[in-house]
Image (cartoon, rainbow, N blue to C red):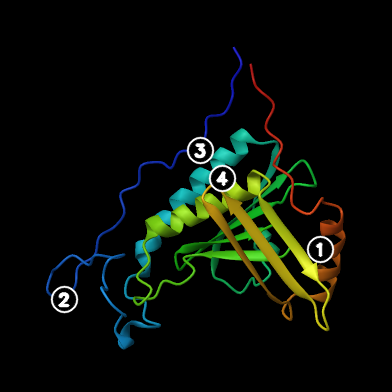
Amino acid sequence: MTHRPAAYVRPPIVGPTFHDAEGALIPYGNRWEGPPPEDTYSVDTHPERFAPIHAVADALIAHLRDAYDVEVTDDIETKADLIHPAVEAVRAVRIQPKDPASAPLTFVFTSYPGIVLHAGALHDFHYPSCGCDACDSTWEAEAAELERHVAAVVSGQYRESVVRRPRPWVAYSMTYPDGQTSGRGPAPDVPSKRLKAARRVLRDIPGHWAPWPQASPRS
């Protein structure tokens, strides 16, 4: 009998709930009907509400290990893959596809709690991207972003580039079934040796990272 890995499904997760000083449930994700109050900016009242993102990352790592032909390194030292490694990491896992034309992923679990995902050669993505009370994000929304970004990378829908200007700029784009996201900007914080190495890697791929190779079916 041939075994093929199942498609990724988020495991059942019961997230935490929080109450205000009067005992009312705080409806994260639906707190503000208009602009948030000024005193909610840069204030993280309950960052622990994002803790379930760690469980989602665990599930993604297990799925990628099972479904694709990859090498997995579960070692805090892989935190060094981040372009901006100045985070309080409690765990780091690098997943390197056996095809060098496919973008690697490194999941860095932070004490905040959250996940910083390093994708490909030059980009870090944060979940949550901002956890302040004004932004009013939820762990479910941030986990959904993490999941669809990972899906874009493994399906070959992730592009990176280095653009020569008076100073180098870096850019990325991800394509999803329902749209696209992209970003670009100057790269003053990227070490020159790393930028040169990234240019060499990106020249060898045909405009975008390749889909990840699937794991061989097991009997």
Image point (49%, 44%), residue name:
59
Disc 4: which residue: 61
Q: CA distance from mark 4 to mark 3?
A: 10 Å
Nearer the observer, 144 or 48: 144
The image shows residue 15 at horizontal and vertical percentages of 31, 54
Mark 1 vs mark 4: give the one in front.
1
Disc 3: which residue: 8
Is 99 placed left or right of 78 in the picture? Answer: right
The quarter in which the C terminus is drawn is: top right
Residue 198: which numbered mark, if any? 1
Q: Secondary structure at mark 1?
A: helix
Residue 21: which numbered mark, if any? 2
Image point (74%, 50%), residue name:
209
Outermost residue, left side: 22
Q: Secondary structure at mark 4?
A: helix
| Crowding near the residue tagged with mark 2, few <14, some 14–19, many ≥20 C-alpha atoms within 10 Å | few
Q: Amino acid at mark 4?
A: Ile
